[in-house]
Amino acid sequence: MKNYYTVPAGLGGFQCTTRECEDNCCRNSTWNITVDEGAYKKYETMDNEFGRRILSCIEKTETGYKMREYDNGQCPLLDKDGFCEIHLNLGEGYLCTTCATYPRSSTVYAGKPEYWMSLSCPEVVRAVIYRDYKPFFVELEFVGEINSKLGEFEESEYKIRSLLYDIMNSKLTLLQKIMFMGVAMRQVGKIPKDENLKKALLGVIPGVRQGITNKDIINQLANVETPDRVLINSIIGKVAEISAQAASVPKVVPPDLPNAPYYDLMRNYREDVNSGEHQKYILDAYEKLVVPYVNENPNLFENYLRYRLHSTQYPKGLKDYTVSYTSFVGEFLAMLIFTAGLFHKKDKITEEEMVPAIYLFHRVISHNEKLRVRLAEIIGENASLGTLLGLFVGVR
């Protein structure tokens, strides 16, 4: 029996651009490259000068091994032309697991293999967000055994995510989709913990699906009272502070790296937050710079949210669906505010600038578990639907 991966269509023909990449992952000292024990043992058995050189670039940690911190902002095993010497001289089989797989990831969710790549890679951002594939997901043959036996709870979670995909694939506007995702997760969150989730969902999912096409319900949600500007400004300011403080800039950025200037912008943004200067421009830049780009390109951000549903397996394993939704939406909001912080001095954002905003956000911020928790707390403190809608000031 054949099995198939669920794969975002844009990743079907993905290829690393290696030395042509504007922010090559081997030339950026934010990375902590873990070297697995299997790869380390291969290097130990190499009784030659190259093997000893590889070992000299690795240091032992409390939990295993990692590449030494880059002195010049790039991996010491890159040659003068920007190619990996291990890959060139020994082949892919000698790469450590991190280098052999990044930015790729896979898992089995609800008995179905799923495959995705990290948005911390600029080429992945282009492949899944900036290319118009229909359908968004395709299936590729999977070689291997799959345990397709499902627990009842896992099957129920998969149904919740299917409902969220239906919302994202509907004809609603971007803001309406965000609204209805919130409605769905709040309805699920109201189900008592001792109740049979699978059975209870039978009363929730059909109602949300009907609401997607019900003009009266859509209009009712559109008229939800939003908070005043003072509260909106306060929350956006706090989100800006967290996103900027979590964005650690590399100690060394190779000066000839094409996207090196964006690290300067990130560093300046962080300094603005530390000095309080961001309060003078962040809301204005968000409303007048980022929101127009979102409204002009809603499909891009629908792709973004659709892809995050896939790559996070949302809402897999979550205990509080209401809080989890504020965290999910909070990450999206933080990415937009981060973009405003980087480019607040510009008059207009272009694709050339939005791509680094997205991948840098994911490279230095979104992998931070403490950040996601804090974002959920900040938005959760004012977690009414009206507040969530109010935070997307001007988004249609």
Image (cartoon, helix red, strand yellow):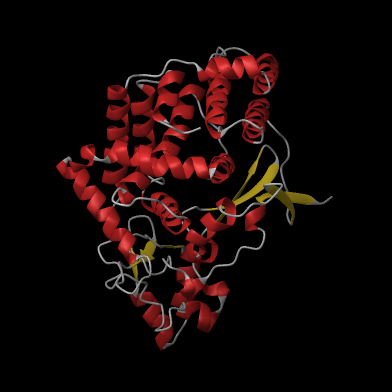
In x, y percent, where is residue 166? Answer: 67, 32
Q: Quadrant of residue 330?
A: top left
In x, y percent, where is residue 308? Answer: 54, 42
* 336 horizontally vs 87: left or right: left
Q: Residue at x 18, y 44 (%)?
A: 274
Q: Is residue 318 above or below residue 201?
A: below
Which residue appears farthest toward the right when viewing the image? 1
Q: Residue at x 73, y 39 (%)?
A: 148
Q: Is residue 66 above or below residue 47?
A: above
* 223 horizontally vs 373: left or right: right
Q: Is residue 17 above or below residue 115?
A: below
Which residue appears farthest toward the front when viewing the image? 347
Q: Is residue 19 above or below residue 218?
A: below
* 129 horizontally vs 148: left or right: left
In x, y percent, where is residue 228? Answer: 32, 19
Q: Quadrant of residue 373?
A: top left
Is residue 249 at all visible to an observer of this figure? no
Which residue appears farthest toward the bottom when viewing the image? 49
